[in-house]
Image: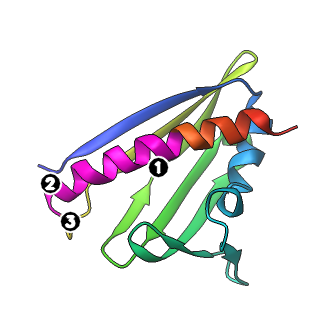
Amino acid sequence: MGRSRTITISVAKKTGDAFDAILKMPPKMMPDAKINDSGWWLFTGPHGKSMLKFAENKSLGILDHQYIDEESKWDVPMRVVSNGDVSEVIITLNKPDEITDVQFDQRMEELGEMFNSMKNIIESES
């Protein structure tokens, strides 16, 4: 059986605003991020050359994405759910076969820090 982890982040933004802020997030978190004609964000991540592409549906709050770096490939389900004036961002991370359990645990620690930064950026968006 595979390993996974689901993370929920509460952000003080309405759902549409949180959704839009996440789509504009890559260059705010990775200064060298550039988007290509195919919709892939290309940048240098913590594990080398990386790519990120969203498969979004705003009306349903879907921000699924694929993330690829030099060590692994992740298919990440992500949702933005309304909770009044607050939004819940729900992300499920399934361990790719090509990384070990120890590497997965390390990635979860790294992502915890990244999600805190993401929350701060979303909430600071006007």
Looking at the image, the residue that sits furthest to the left is 1
Q: Which residue is located at x 63 percent, y 57 percent?
A: 29
Question: Magenta residues?
Answer: 100-115
Can you tell which mark lies on residue 77? 1
Q: CA distance from mark 2 to mark 3?
A: 7 Å
Disc 1 versus disc 2: distance between alpha carbons? 20 Å
Q: Main secondary structure of the magenta part?
A: helix
Residue shown at 70% from the left, 76% from the top:
34
Q: Position of residue 116 (x, y in %)?
A: 54, 37
Q: Is residue 109 above or below residue 65?
A: above
Residue 10 at x, y = what percent? 58, 25
Q: Residue at x 41, y 61 (%)?
A: 75
Q: Position of residue 66 (x, y in %)?
A: 48, 65
In the picture shown, does residue 38 fall above or below 104? below
Helix, strand or loop under label 1: loop
Q: Is residue 116 above or below residue 29?
A: above
List the residue tagged with mark 2: 101
